[in-house]
Image (spheres, rainbow, N blue to C red):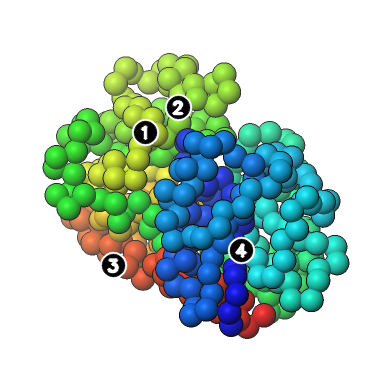
Amino acid sequence: MNGTLTVVLDEVGERSPTTVGRYAAALTHALATTAPTGFEIAAMTSKVSESREQRIRDLLPGVGELRQTAMPARELRQAWLHSLTTLPVHGLVHATSLLAPLALEPEPGDQVTVTVHGLQSLSDRSVRKQRWFDRALRRALRRADGIVVPSTAVAEDLQLLHDLGDRVRVVHPAPVVARALPADGGATSTLRLPDEYVLAITVPGARAQAEALIETVASPSMPDARVVVAGPVQWGEATLAAMAVEAGLPPGRLVMLGDLDAAQLAVAHHRALAHLHVSEVDALGLSLLDAAALGTPTVHPANRSLREIAGDASVPVHGGPHELAAALAALLADDGERARLGLHAMDRARAFTWEAAAQQVWRLHAEL
């Protein structure tokens, strides 16, 4: 093998990091550091601002050429959905999401692999975006040369939708921000955190997840613990503060930090008593893996993908917000079990690295 692998970036470099953006940046960096002899990595993104382009370059120092299409993300999604392009992409292409240039009539030597993070969009921004996700998924299942998924559970679900033969590969993700923990464990960090707290993370475009978090914290089963929230606190006109007031949460119950950089988020994970993860549609488990790598057990919905990634080093919960709150209360009440799970979680997280994930992607292209 020799030549260039073009990686299509999605949501990388946004001011408020998304789950897909974190995944794409981490994998692309690893692809660059594990590239076979004679190969180089090029990146492609939708049209972005100069400041965002600089953030992308800062995140991906090992990537060579960075190409931009003539269209911003919204228009590019629709154009590629209909196989329209002003910037043809040929050769080996790996898309870090469903945003992929799948041509109607690919030229000899063209090879496009896509990434399916789950059967539901991680964003609930709009009905329009969910409709795009559904159509892009069906199109990828029909046309992509290879499909990367984060778990066997997602692979099995996709096989029920379409016979994929040997085109699908399970490539487990890895911790993203854990490796940014300062050497002193955050002892000199300026981040202001309570002495004891539970960590929850919000993401752009996922208002429903924020609403589920508030419902969980407001549950009568919720333990008397402060909840530190890292991530965006506003979705359109809706704010986390207003949701908290409407739910009757007392002042100070939520500590809203907004977006944190990687080192700050690592410190927040490291110091937390537990990580409360309320998303039922998340199949990637990036925040679960970051918490695990830093010795913090996670309480989360018992979807099959998260259970597969966590092994038995987390607290999977069947049910909704009240059941999540009750499981969190039980965990915080048992210091011995919490310590045991934390150590087990660290061992589990060591099984996943981005270098191993990148090597699996390279192997997929070689086999195709």
332 relative to 355 in the view: left or right: left
Separation of residues labelled 4 and 1 (CA atoms): 36 Å
Amino acid type assigned to the residue bearing label 2 in the image: Val
Residue type at numbered disc 3: Asp
Of the two numbered discs 4 and 2 in the rendering, the one whose residue sits closer to the viewer: 4
* Mark positioned earlier in the residue sequence (4 or 1): 4
> What's the mark number on residue 79?
none
Residue highlighted by disc 3: 347
Give the structural element (helix, strand or loop) at label 2: loop
Residue at 67% x, 55% y is: 98
Closer to us: 218 or 278: 278
CB under 8 Å between callouts 4 and 2?
A: no
Observer-side mark, 4 or 1, equals 4
How many other residues sit within 10 Å of disc 2, few (<14), some (14-19) or many (≥20)? many
Q: CA distance from mark 3 to mark 1?
A: 26 Å
Q: Which numbered disc flags the more N-terminal residue, 4 or 2?
A: 4
Which residue is denoted by mark 4 in the rendering?
6
Identify the mark at residue 233; answer none if there is no mark: 2
Q: Is residue 304 visible?
A: no
Instruction: Compare marks 2 and 3 and give the one earlier in the sequence.
Output: 2
Residue 108 drawn at (x, y percent): 79, 76
Could you tell me which residue is drawn at 58 percent across and 79 percent down?
A: 2
| Sequence-first tag of 3 and 1 | 1
**Residue at horizontal 71 percent and vertical 43 percent from the top:** 70
